[in-house]
Amino acid sequence: MNIFGLLPSEIKERIGTDFPAYRYKQLMHWLYGKYSFEPEMMSDLPKDFKAWLKESFSFSLPQVQEILKGSDGSSKYLLKLEDGKLIEMVLMPLDKKLTLCVSSQVGCRRKCSFCATGRLGLKRKLEVHEIVGQILLAAAESQPQRLTNIVFMGMGEPLDNFDNVAKALKIIQAEESLSFSPRRTTLSTCGIADGIIRLADSGIKCKLAVSLNSAKADTRTQLMPINRRYPLPVLKAALIHYLSKSSFRVTFEYILIPEVNMGLSDIKALQKYVGDLSCKINFIPFNPVPQLPYRQPTEAEIESFMANAQLIKQAITLRRSRGTDISGACGQLAGKHNTHKE
Ligand code: SF4
């Protein structure tokens, strides 16, 4: 059993009464305070407790295979899992923030047409310890800087791996582990309406981002086949339910793709769709992905779109993707390594 897939309360329970209660605290401090993951290196633990730890748990983390550094300071990590499968995570520093983009699955079954990961198909879901493992690795790698934000925007659809993502969130938010703030944690979905409702009802706290990309049914279906399963009105009803239970507003992500979703009628459809929803909208210029039939918008196209989008009353921002030169930006993850090496 991998220790990074367990809640602090589960670890405590396993330690039970066989060892003094303070051994649990010492262990948690090594793992989540010092990011030291080898029992042998935990210098203030006695031999018998170390031996019991090694016998009782696996402490293995995803292995770093390669780190690609981008010109904007982003680092993309290629990670190898125990079964040899490869995933990616991206660390993105910006001003005083350090954001980690984590993966929730190997590949993805949702087939969004602008996304490199979608082309892989779903290989498998990540286990809880593989999700928490990415976060611990990133926290250890970036010391002395602290991770300030975590976004589930890497490979995979997090709501298609609901149970494991939910438990990983509980682990990192627990006081005895990282005590990571829910307001600094964002889960990004392609619009799995059932999952949004489940998330709202679960009591799990985090921010929610929805990859919308069009408020026109046909265009959205062309970009995101999930729109057939959960059409725009169904998605909106789920979001209204989520907002009734959450203190956070929703973020819509909207990738700008020329000739597809950047016309005035697209903006008007979006304005109508968001209506009075408590939300903000991030517009993200499309990042080129080899073999995809879309192009990057020019600066003039982006400017003109943003000027027209002012008619939307909610907050709108233009977000430049980070890590584009290392294929670490939205929709670019996992293309190269997984397709070539698996
Ligand atoms: S955008 Fe997200 S949901 Fe869509 S295929 Fe890519 S990883 Fe899957």
Image: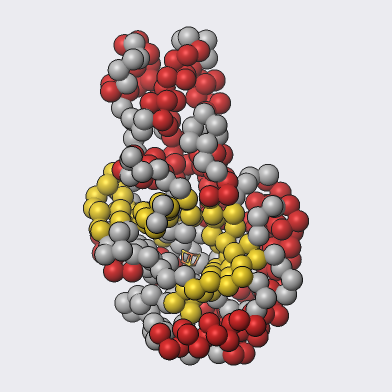
> Which residue is rendered at x = 39% and y = 82% of the image?
296
Res. 207 in view: yes
Give whichever of 61, 180 is nearer the camera: 180
The relative height of residue 99 versus residue 36 in the rendered view (above or below) is below
In the picture provided, is 109 more to the left or to the right than 232?
A: left
The relative height of residue 293 versus residue 114 in the rendered view (above or below) is below
Please give the count of numbered marks on the rendered protein.
0
In the picture provided, is 212 more to the left or to the right than 342?
A: right
Q: Horizontal and vertical percent for residue 288?
A: 35, 77
Q: Horizontal and vertical percent for residue 138?
A: 36, 45
Q: Horizontal and vertical percent for residue 18?
A: 48, 9
> Which residue is rendered at x = 49% and y = 55% of the image?
152
Q: From the image, which quarter does the C terminus lie in?
A: bottom left
Res. 123 in view: no
Give whichever of 189, 185 is nearer the camera: 185
> Which residue is rendered at x = 29% and y = 69% of the image?
325
Give whichever of 11, 251 is nearer the camera: 251
> Which residue is rendered at x = 48% and y = 42% of the image?
128
Q: Name the image quarter holding residue 337.
A: bottom left
Q: From the image, which quarter does the N terminus lie in?
A: top left
- Display colour scheme: secondary structure
Q: Horizontal and vertical percent for residue 248?
A: 65, 55
The relative height of residue 86 versus residue 2 in the rendered view (above or below) is below
Give whichever of 61, 138 is nearer the camera: 138
Q: Name the image quarter holding residue 42.
A: top left
